[in-house]
Amino acid sequence: MQPEDLKIVKLSNGEQVVCYFSYEEGSEFVRLIEPLELKLHSNVNEHGAVDETICLTDWIHHTNDNVFSIAKHRIMTITKPDKSLIEYYATSKKKYDKQKNLIEKQRQADQNARLLEDKFTKGDVKLTKKELYDILAGKITKH
């Protein structure tokens, strides 16, 4: 997918989603790929004028999925973003992906520490060096 393939999809509930878009002829559903929700924030400045800023956030939080199917009748319109939004999307997507990777690494490290603590708590203190290295490296996981 190329940056110029990005779309802004306006949904019937008013949400605007910046994403790659896929549709198969005859299907009742469309796919939103790597969607970020476009949010508009309005503030009144000290001169009484309205300043508007945008931000991109995860469309659906706390998921590892990157592709979402929605009923096509929920779409009001589809348009192309301007160059500044394409650049902002690329930057935001990199930031979110990096953040998710860091969170996953921390979750894995926490899980490994709990596994090691469980082994010692249960009196199984006879770990070989290999077992200890495997636990710390994340090669042994708790099931």
Image: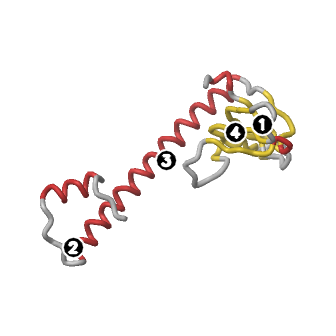
Residue placed most toward the observer, 103 or 39: 103
Q: Residues within 10 Å of mark 1 (few under 14, many from 20)?
A: many
Q: Are marks 4 and 1 in contact (CB under 8 Å)?
A: yes
Q: Earlier in the sequence, mark 1 or mark 3?
A: 1
Q: Circle 1 — which element?
A: strand
For the point 25% across and 56% down, which residue is it? 136
Which label sits on residue 93? none
Q: Circle 4 — which element?
A: strand
Please tell me in which quadrant of the rendered image residue 73 appears: top right
Q: What's the amino acid at mark 3? A: Lys
Q: What's the amino acid at mark 1? A: Val
Q: Quadrant of the C terminus?
A: bottom left
Cα distance in 3D space between marks 1 and 3: 24 Å
Q: Which residue is mark 4?
A: 32
Q: Which residue is mark 3?
A: 100
**74, above or below 81, in the image:** below
Cα distance in 3D space between marks 1 and 2: 53 Å
Residue placed most toward the observer, 41 or 142: 142
State the image coordinates of residue 25 (x, y, percent, origin top left).
79, 30
Q: Nearer the viewer, mark 4 or mark 1?
A: 4
Q: Which residue is mark 2?
A: 120
Q: Circle 2 — which element?
A: helix
Q: What's the amino acid at mark 4? A: Leu
Q: Which residue is mark 1?
A: 9
